[in-house]
Image (cartoon, helix red, strand yellow):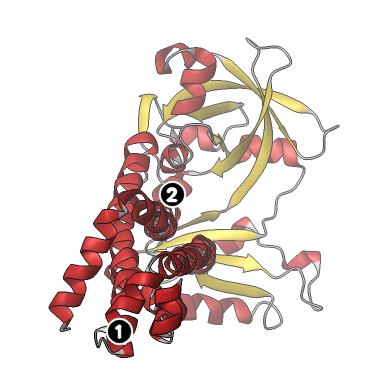
Amino acid sequence: MNMYDLVKSSIRSLKANKMRAFLTMLGIIIGISSVIAMSAIGKGGQKTITGNLQSTGYGNFQVAVNTTSTDYVAEYDLTDKQVTEISKIDGVEAAAPKIQSMGQLSFPKYPGKNERGFLYVTTKDYEKIDPVQYLYGRAFIDSEYNSYEKLITIDSETAKDYYGSYEAAIGETIELQVGARDSASYKYKIIGVFQNPYIGLTSLFGGRFKPRVVRVPLKAYMTTSGTDTYSTVIAKAKDPEQLNQIISKVQSDLDTQAPAKIYEVSAATQNGASFDSILSTLNIFITFIAGISLLVGGVGVMNIMLVSVTERIREIGIRKAIGAQPKSILLQFLVEAVIISTLGGIIGLLVGVSFAYLVFLLIGIEPVFSTFIVILALVVSMLIGIVFGVAPARKAARMNPVDALRA
């Protein structure tokens, strides 16, 4: 019997037991669709997150004080003088203190309602380095950056959720508490509403995760923090292509002011790259877990094929009695197993792609499909048919025709 006849015979056998064939495929379908969908959604989520993290980081670098160094003392903390010196280095467009922390936000219209939010302390130069898009109201003007007046700008989602609209939020107050629970809170007047920089993350979690973000001027913040030094300074290169040379120059200048390793200068995108590496590892792990279901599907194929061999003992006996070779019997059952698993893989691929796009429609994560993963999934589904189909096929091929006819 040639391969064409084997395939025809196998398909005829599967058509005779359509429901059983489908149920056998089900494990493969679930396994392949899980791998395809999880991989595509994971890569899409990774692209969304890293895109948000790095969108404002291109061409930026930061200077951080290594407080864990054995040579560290408080006098090495960064000051306004050093910020100015960094900004004057050739190739640097702007430099500013980088003060970002979590704060407790309270809303007078909702007594007892508190939320944690991201606090960004800003200056005129900081706005050049890490700008936001204002949707209503205004940004801080030059005099306000150097004023102790407590003014604040808030993100678009917070404005809508707590004040009803962007316009309604302007002129209202918000209480901000930074530090320990027993630290004082201060009322700030809202003057502007900006596009939430983490809006991509909001869609990533289906709107359930809404990071609250506020910005306050440096001088107003310093009156509440009790300090005039910084642990981190962020800066922007005039030409991003020259970033590495600028970083080397800044590092060299700072190393003359303190022991080596006290000041660490790095590109802002390096942090994004590290986070991207973590997400890649997590994505691989999730895909691997989804792939375990393929083993379950393989066991299902083997079990059903063993049942099929048992049910077709008499057919096997007749074929052997009229001269069929063991190799032909083995190939027939092996081809059946491969057809089942391959069809399951193709259907699983279609289901996985459909599910990934359904997630995109629901929560906005655009799936990213890997050609390698798609091809690998189909090859693996075929291999599952071969690996898990061998045992039933060998059992059929080794059957004694006399015993088979008596069964």
Q: Nearer the viewer, residue 399 or 151?
A: 399
Q: Nearer the viewer, residue 178 or 385?
A: 385
Q: How many marks?
A: 2
Q: Is residue 245 above or below residue 238?
A: below
Percent position (x, y) of residue 168?
Answer: 45, 11
The amino acid type of the residue labelled 2 equals Asp
Q: From the viewer's perspective, is 368 left or right of 75?
A: left
Give the labeled residue for mark 1: 321
Q: Residue at x 60, y 76 (%)?
A: 254
Q: Residue at x 34, y 42 (%)?
A: 360
Q: From the viewer's perspective, is 174 left or right of 77?
A: left
Q: Quadrant of the N terminus?
A: bottom left
The amino acid type of the residue labelled 1 equals Ala
Give the labeled residue for mark 2: 130
Does residue 340 appear in the picture of this structure? yes
Percent position (x, y) of residue 173?
Answer: 59, 17
Is mark 1 in CB contact (under 8 Å) with mark 2? no
Q: Hey, which residue is sitting farthest right in the picture?
A: 182
Percent position (x, y) of residue 215?
Answer: 54, 36
